[in-house]
Amino acid sequence: MKTPALVFLLAVGLSLTPKLCGQATPLPAAVTPDAERALNAVAADYVKLVLAVGQHDSDYVDAYYGPPEWKQQAERTKKPLTELTATAQALSKQLQTVEPSRLQGLLRLRHNFLATQLRSVEGRISLLAGRKLPFDEESRLLYDAVLPEVPESHFAAVRAKLNQLLPGEGALADRLEQFEKRFVVPKDKVEAVMRAAIAECRRRTRARIELPEKEDFKLEFVTGKPWNAYNWYKGGAQSVIQVNLDLPFRMTQAIGLAAHEGYPGHHVYNALLEQELVGKRGWTEYQVYPLYSPQSVIAEGSADFGIEVMFPMAERVQFAREVLFPLAGLDPAEAARYFAVLHLAGFELASARGLIQRRYVDGRLGREEALRLLSAEALLPRARAEKRLEFAAKYRAYIVTYGAGYRLVRNYVEARGGAAGNEARRWEVFRDLLSAPMMPADLRP
């Protein structure tokens, strides 16, 4: 995830407006000690509530590095969902006793963070208690976001471009699959390729962001998971990054996963929140991360957009050609064409995959029809399409965090830092965003 704006403001206690992080604005009356104490009390009970919900849902608590006794207490006593609902509602009412208009900058953002997260926690409890909702209603309830609608004409244009790049006989999805197979990283070279990609992403990120001195990660390779990779944040600026090798490892995954899970993605986001908000301000609410919450929209959106801030496509291709392709024993001559094809098939068709998954989760598509559409419209081979449906069945509306999050973060950064070309300013806005208590509503115009 500093002047820049945020580090300086954190140091001297000046204000930021919720909508325009980095621009000071006069606000009424400084926050009173009573108001800050009230926020601290709500924050501590919020953490305990999330831990308690985690006893009903093993995936809910994605990270926790707070007092061990709070976690132990939650594990000793599994509270009924009705009691947890009452607690969430009571905390929301308690938070309402603090008037947001009386709070300055980051404290106002903090108030909104707690209010938004508490609404999501209550919503998650209701789903655990048996409430059923359509995909879009669930995504609004848990994440304060909905999937962006993209016209079919966009996807048709993307497929037309791919058809030109991959001429030949047979279905476009089959031609794409055969093309991708030429750039699969051999299993015995995956670790070297991943470590080289992470090292370069780390180097580029550290050149722009002052990270905690001892930040680090452990890289592991796993199988039998519904996801491609995962970052498990452990606190103390330490992460475990797991890469799933159920399916053949594609060259584009190296930089993509290194950026998304590591630098400047999840590892950096969590490390900066811990450093700036927990370490410097004592805000205990950031010691826990509930997966099914609006915070994930910021986390996934910044992880997806971060690669564009850090690694412009031309430089990505050059690094892959000069470093990653030789490490993998692949011919670097087609690196540029390979990245062009995979950008279209992977990035530009991402929304098509999400919209099909939404219909599958809602029960509007059966499994075989969803698989057919993922092949015909999103150009996924059968094995990867099956993984997509496995992910959708388990995580349901979580899918929204990627597409909606990416657009929110991209639009926010570009509105304040400009489009590609003004790299210093884009990095400044991006790192401030990673270090602040932002929610989806704070990124909207």
Image (tube, rainbow, N blue to C red):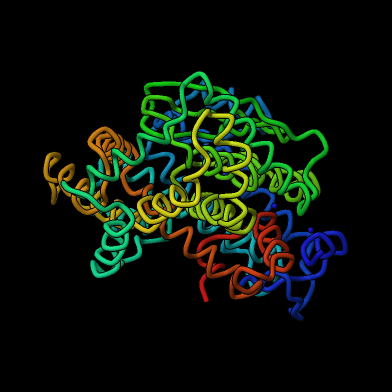
Q: Residue furthest right?
A: 12
The quadrant in which residue 10 appears is: bottom right
Q: Position of residue 267 (x, y in %)?
A: 63, 40
Residue at image position (70%, 61%) is: 427
Q: Position of residue 378 (x, y in %)?
A: 26, 51
Left or right: residue 19 versus residue 56 is right
Residue at image position (51%, 58%) is: 116
The quadrant in which residue 247 appears is: top left
Q: Is residue 97 something one can see in this rendering? A: yes
Q: Vertically, is 160 above or below 365?
A: below
Residue at image position (66%, 66%) is: 108
Q: Nearer the viewer, residue 400 or 414?
A: 414
Q: Is residue 286 something one can see in this rendering? A: no
Q: Nearer the viewer, residue 150 or 109?
A: 150
Q: Position of residue 332 (x, y in %)?
A: 53, 40
Q: Vertically, is 167 above or below 192?
A: below
Residue at image position (65%, 39%) is: 287
Q: Vertically, is 261 above or below 16?
A: above
How many numbered badges does the structure rendering display? 0
Q: Nearer the viewer, residue 443 or 227?
A: 227
Q: Nearer the viewer, residue 85 or 321?
A: 321
Q: Position of residue 379 (x, y in %)?
A: 26, 48
